[in-house]
Image: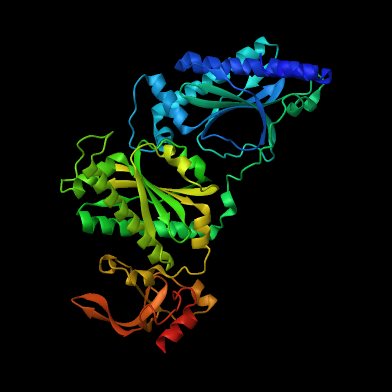
Amino acid sequence: MLEVQNLKQKSSAFNGIADWYAEVANPILRAASEALEGLIGLKVERGKPSLRLSAYTEEDITVAISVEGDLKGVILLGFNYRTAFRMLQKMLGEELNTNLPISDFLKESELARSALQEIANILSGRSAMHLEASGKNCIISPPELLMRRGVLLSERDFQQLVIPIKTDVGNLELSIALFPNGNGSGQGREVFVAQQIIQPRRSIVRYDFANPEHLGRTVYSNLQQVHERFQQVLAQKVGIRMRIGLRLSKASLEKDTFAHFLQRDYQWSVAGIFNLDMSNTPWIMAISQSVALLLVDRWLGGPGKLAQVERKDWTPLERGALSRIMELLGDAYAETWQQQTGLKVSLRLLQVSTGDLSEQSVSFQSVGAALLVSHRLQVGDEIGVLQWILIADSLSSLLSKPSIVSGTEAVLNSPISPSIRLKLHLGWKCPSITAKQLQNLKVGTILMLHSPLLIWCKGKVIGLGEPYRKNGRIVAKIAKYMGLNKISLSHPDDKSDEGAERAKS
């Protein structure tokens, strides 16, 4: 039986409550044990229960089961990505190799989702069966898989009886937040006073998953712009140095604590740990191991083809090449920051990790929030992932400064500026018309255009042009060029009248 049965003797006033807890919690614990032992074959050991006050899911993956009837509330079974992956391997009876982060694999793999859903279904069905056997008639909803940490479950914090479950593939947490529905026992909602039965060891402060460290929108917007440019700069640098094609997808952002990111399984990757000189904090870049092997082969003069998907041992020559490649990628990232923000960012490579990055977590002193920026990375025919783990404090100090400059201006000073393509736009200004004339517009109406043409780039007017025909096509001849650094007019559609008149003069 639960520990609450031993604690109930401390105060006779709460004997009824302790009995009620034992009647409710034990059937659910039994259901969880049967789901893990019967389906997966795990050895289950129950830990010491504690009290938590939270409205969020606390683990990477959570099975959420809603309960109605004699009991009302929710049952949660939570576990991290690493434990989920090991459970999946145990169920299938084979070692799984993936070129993606485990979080991505579990979200995208239909097999993985089906296996996790099966665990949830067994937990739900067994819970209903054992609760009914104990005299509690409950309606249990189909279980829902929540594949993200920090999902908001309620507008207000609610008490949860948390029971750790230890297995040979990792730890899980069973959280029970159930109340009597108020129709039977007469005890009402006041029964859920767990602190009277289980002595809380310490109060738990709710973490704001939705906005760690309260980073502003400007930080996220500017970071997205940095990574949009990073796609171009990295492709240019790798193409010039290694003569191989590289493509990055659009970046996705995930927010959590730095420590939690490091606890994820990074066996799929190799990682470069950099020191940001401006704030003396670590930034970490991880890339898929298969992509790293391909780049190493190309760096050493090979064709850039994979000999094998997974490499357990790296030779000294391969490690040296990998370090040089990490430095190249870090230099491209630092250059991107300089181009986009105008700040001289220096990233110094401290070490390269070819094992599980979580084993290195004890060496980091940084705590608090972080952002995980992920790209899908394609090199040749191989597709993998590139991730940056960035400390929130360092981002605030970099991106909250009013030194963000035009990306186009910064590009002009880049050593690869001859290879970067920018879009030019040309347009005329039309004379103003009355509202009645606007209503009378129709197909075939001729509108007069004011000369000269306005030429703008990235929202800045950079010159004036004159139209004429050449080889049967309408082209523009530059009549006046002001340059990017000499004029700061807006796009003519923003403040067209004032901007266009100043440009003409």
Q: Nearer the viewer, residue 451 or 171?
A: 171
Image quarter where the C terminus lies is: bottom left
Whether residue 380 is visible to the viewer of this picture, yes or no, is no
What residue lies at 26% left-to-right and 65% top-to-bottom? 419
Whether residue 136 is visible to the viewer of this picture, yes or no, is yes
Residue 387: x percent and y percent? 39, 47
Residue 237: x percent and y percent? 27, 58
Q: Is residue 105 above or below residue 171?
A: below
**Most extreme residue toward the bottom, as rendered?**
505
Residue 293: x percent and y percent? 25, 42
Q: Nearer the viewer, residue 144 or 234?
A: 234
Residue 30: x percent and y percent? 59, 15
What residue lies at 33% left-to-right and 72% top-to-bottom? 412
Relative to 355, is 301 on the left or the right? left
What residue lies at 31% left-to-right and 54% top-to-bottom? 327
Image quarter where the N terminus lies is: top right
Q: Is residue 33 above or below residue 389?
A: above
Q: Is residue 179 above or below residue 459?
A: above
